[in-house]
Amino acid sequence: MRPRKIIAMVMTFLMMLSLLPSLVFAAAAPEGELGGQLKIKGTAAVGSELSADYEKVTPEGLTDDYVTFSWSRKVGDQLTEVGTEKTYKLVDEDLGNKIELKITGKAEMGITGELKVNTVEIVATPEEAPEETTELPEGEQEAAPTEETPVQEIAAEDTPAEGSQTDENTQPAQDVAEDTQTEEVIDIGADEPTDSSADVMQPADGQDTENSADNSQSEITTDDSVINIGTEGYLEVPENGQAEDANQGASAESPAPQKPVYTAEIVAENTAEDGTAVLDFGTVNAGFTQENANSSMTKNVTVKNTGNSTLNFKEISPEHFMVKDLGSLAAGESVDAWVMPREGTAVGEYSDTITYETEEGVKVSFIAKLTVAEQKQDDTNTDQQPAEKPAAPETTPEVTPEVTPEVTPEVTPEVTPEVTPEVTPEVTPEVTPEVTPEVTPEVTPEVTPEVTPEVTPEVTPEVTPEVTPEITPAPSFTTDISEVKFDSKEAGYKEAPAAVTINVSNTGNVKLTGIAVSVSGNEFTVSAPSASELEANANQSVSFTVAPAVGLAAGTYTQTVSIKTDQTDYLNIPVSFTVTEAAAKLTAVGKVSDISLANGVEKSAAGLQLPSTVKITTNKGDMNASVKWDVKGSAYNQNSTEAQKFSVKGTVALPDGVTNPDNLSLVVSVNVTVSRGSIVSDAGNNSITGISSDGNYTTETKITFTAVGAGMDIENPIKGDVRYQPLNWEVLEARSWDSAPYSATFRMGKNGNYTLTVTYNQQQFDGSNWVNTGTQDTKQVNFTVNAAPNQTLTPAADKTDANQKNAVKTGDNTPILPFVIILIVAIVLIVGILVYRNKKK
């Protein structure tokens, strides 16, 4: 092989090696306008966390550091911001609504524009949530590639750019480099170059626009990109090759089976304060039976299956009451269950909680109340009853002269055996000597005339008048109910309240006859007694019923039911019944007008100027109903200076006499707009990023920093807003900015301790323009630069204007010096070969 060929190959290898930095180490950071397709990660269910998905967003390599976030709750067309962090956790207020994510590029990072995307409607649980969380914005459809425009990626190095030429007239690399943005690195504090190589090393990044080798490198970096066609809307192609629309795939799935819901409710004639159904059976006498009890002893409760599945009720047996067993109850079905006290319940007051339970674990309860009183007794005639035996003190000597001998034959055989043992110990001293010796031996075997002359005159006359006393008649009776109050009805009722049964009992010592019942007016009706007679001391009763008439007008009716017998006077029982006015029926709930307020008002109903009433419509006309506002649950932030739009929900309380038979929603909502106040930015928020006092920097390190001015991110400024605009920066040398981005890249030529100082101008918006106020603020960062290992050259400072547009920032600190040396050697060899050939010729 000829030496020239070997040399040519070596030269080629060295030139290729010198190009490695541009091919290997020029991985560009993302820069440009946001595009492509943004998605939301997470599950669209309350309690889940959402985050942004950049997989199909351009420019490539985008991370959270390049954008700002705004999460908003979307209610209809209204948006309320709920978060500005990277992620957002769904809360109860999001249920039934959608969440919009907006990402906005940070201009200081080289990213502009914004992207928006919505979630699907938020559900309660993750099980109900669809697989796809993201929903395309309204009016947009996900683009799908056609046969003429297939999805593909075309590498720039494989396909010439538009307008380029591949023949000998190709545009020189130098022209390409001039059109390409290059990164400016300012070398500060370096010594002047000492040899001819300084001219080559002058640009800090090693790019000399006058050198053809660097021009070739610029051309290569310009083409180092990939063109994505159709990236904003595309179809995902699965392994089987069939394109499938994500929305179409979701709709093709079969609907999830409905989750069974087991619930029930119970309704009775009355309710307790806590809403529990109550049955009150009133007072009954001890020993009551269903036969002699009145109709109020049986009452009903209504049990309804409010779930979506059949309920299977268990049998129950309460201690003091009998109830109906329900069996099975289909979804939406209801049944009336009877309840009655148990016979034989002891005297006392009862308030029992009775619970129906299903095999599915559902429990519904009601309270049954009952008072069992002792049976009343009349003791008024007790003293008039005849004594069973004569009283001893009445046997006095005063009666003796009045007794005649004619009584003796009749009384003696009957009285003598009975009187003797009882009278003997109580006889006065005069009688005892005569009776004791003569009566004892003669009475026991027989009764003889011999006893008569002695015993008869003293004992016999005392017994006769006491044996047959006269009984004084004492007729009386009582009822088991002393007063009757009927449940009220609404005017226009078609069915009267259930009749009440009243039982009459004979409490006297004589038979009652001619039992009759009457009422004092026509508003009540009474039935005829079940019998007209009632024996004394009989375990029986006579019953009758009383009930209000049908069709009574609104009002309260009080009358008297009178009970009378042939032997007694009237006994009166008051009865009452109320007919209420027909209730107004709700037909519509009015809307509340939108409210606009200034910023900073108190977070309260009064501060937000929420109305205390709202208009409602009934079948009897319009009315005003009070409303309770849930201000605490609104998204209003009293401490924010930004403009806010949010809604406040409230619950309407219907006035007395207004019913809602159609179960119309009583929830109202009002939209509130709060304009923002002036933003006065704090100079303390001015900062310098990208450089720190504890950073590890050498004389070969390219340091890129950004000056962040407080309030520079204010959008749509209003009069009075204040911000701080970065003006200039200085490290040994001062440089200024005319416009954003407020950043620069520099490299220190010598090791040592340095200070970076940035100056900010305070500006105020006058309604049209930002105007300098004359106030300035400065921020500083102290840093240390160490000598680079194996450093051989010190580049001179570059006096290029700091406001020149920067090229793509690669963030690459790879030492380029060895490659430059190789390039110089290659050039020298080429020149030597050319000289050698010319001399040889």
Image (cartoon, rainbow, N blue to C red):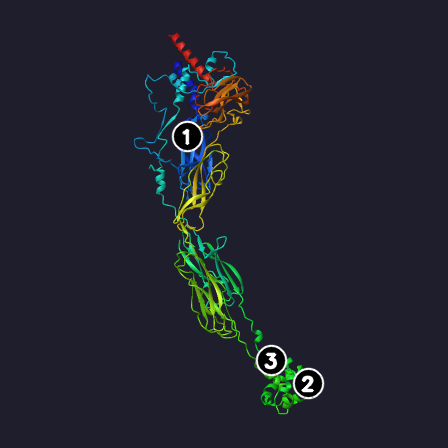
Crowding around mark 2 (Cα neighbors within 10 Å: few <14, some 14 to 19, many 20+) is: some
Q: Quadrant of the C terminus?
A: top left
Q: Quadrant of residue 518?
A: bottom left
The residue mark sitting in front, 2 or 1, is: 2
Q: Amino acid at mark 1?
A: Glu
Rendered location of residue 80, percent (x, y): 44, 36
Q: Name the residue rendered at 57%, 74% in the picture.
A: 382
Q: CA distance from mark 2 to mark 1?
A: 135 Å
Crowding around mark 1 (Cα neighbors within 10 Å: few <14, some 14 to 19, many 20+) is: some
Q: Are circles 3 and 2 on residues that touch, CB within 8 Å?
A: no
The answer to whether residue 349 is visible is yes
Towards the viewer: 493 or 314 = 493
Q: Which comes before the other along the chain, label 2 or label 1?
A: 1
Rendered location of residue 102, percent (x, y): 42, 33
Rendered location of residue 118, percent (x, y): 40, 36
Count of numbered badges drawn on the protein: 3
Tag shown at residue 432? 2
Q: CA distance from mark 3 to mark 2?
A: 21 Å
Which type of secondary structure does the marked residue at label 3 adopt? loop
Q: Amino acid at mark 3?
A: Lys
Q: Name the residue rendered at 49%, 39% in the picture.
A: 606
The answer to whether residue 359 is visible is no
* Vertical comparison of 637 with 159: above or below: below
Towards the viewer: 167 or 631 = 631
Rendered location of residue 497, percent (x, y): 43, 60
Towards the viewer: 330 or 345 = 345
The residue mark sitting in front, 1 or 3, is: 3
Looking at this view, name the residue that lies furthest to the bottom: 449
Q: Which residue is mark 3?
A: 389
Q: Which residue is mark 1?
A: 114
Towards the viewer: 529 or 551 = 551
